[in-house]
Image: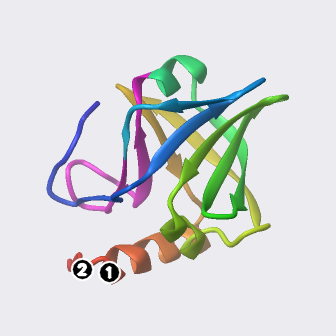
């Protein structure tokens, strides 16, 4: 996990789950990583939990949905990752779906949203007090 850095805004009280037959909570942190800081070429969402790195071996385009209190990433049939924090519904509304790049990084994954959602992610970063 890369952890905190300038330009990475920690989303407090996030919970990360892997959902297969049952829902299993993962230990980890979620950051908005702003373009231009700590080597980010585009603003994206970092989900830092080592178990996710093993769940998704390579990056690929995946479906992501807004759920009550967060987002759900469909990894494969019957397997999801849920990131629970109500602030994420500022980016992806409940019931809204998108298909976007989910990449693997050391100690976790990242979501490279499409432009419309990047703008919402950056607006959330500003709402949380980050100025650039």
Q: Residue at x 51, y 41 (%)?
A: 16
How far across and down, in percent of the image, does residue 21 sit?
Answer: 78, 23
Pointer 1: residues within 10 angstroms few (<14), some, or many (20+)?
Answer: few
Q: Is residue 123 above or below residue 38?
A: below
Of the pair 120 and 84, the residue shown nearer to us: 84
Asked whether the beta carbons under mark 2 and mark 1 sit within 8 Å of each other, the answer is: yes
Q: Which numbered circle lies on residue 129?
A: 2
Q: Residue at x 50, y 60 (%)?
A: 85
Does the magenta run of residues contain 42?
yes
From the image, tell me which residue sits under label 1. 126
What residue range appears in magenta?
A: 30-50
Q: Which numbered circle lies on residue 7?
A: none
**Which quadrant would the C terminus be assigned to in this image?**
bottom left
Does the magenta run of residues contain 40?
yes
Of the pair 125 and 28, the residue shown nearer to us: 28
Left or right of 119, for residue 95:
right
Which color scheme does this rendered protein use?
rainbow
C-alpha span from label 2 to label 1:
5 Å
**Which quadrant would the N terminus be assigned to in this image?**
top left
């Amino acid at each position: 996990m890369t952890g905190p850095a300038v330009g990475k805004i920690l989303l407090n009280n996030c919970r990360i789950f892997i959902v297969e037959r049952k829902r299993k909570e993962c230990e980890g942190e979620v950051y908005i990583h702003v373009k231009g800081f700590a080597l980010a070429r585009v603003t994206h969402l970092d989900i830092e939990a080592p178990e996710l790195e093993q769940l998704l071996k390579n990056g690929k385009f995946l479906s992501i949905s807004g759920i009550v209190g967060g987002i759900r990433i469909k990894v494969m049939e019957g397997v999801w990752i849920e990131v629970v924090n109500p602030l994420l519904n500022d980016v992806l509304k409940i019931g809204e779906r998108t298909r976007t790049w989910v990449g693997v990084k050391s100690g976790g994954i990242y979501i490279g949203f499409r432009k419309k959602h990047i703008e919402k992610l950056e607006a959330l970063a500003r709402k949380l007090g980050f100025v650039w």
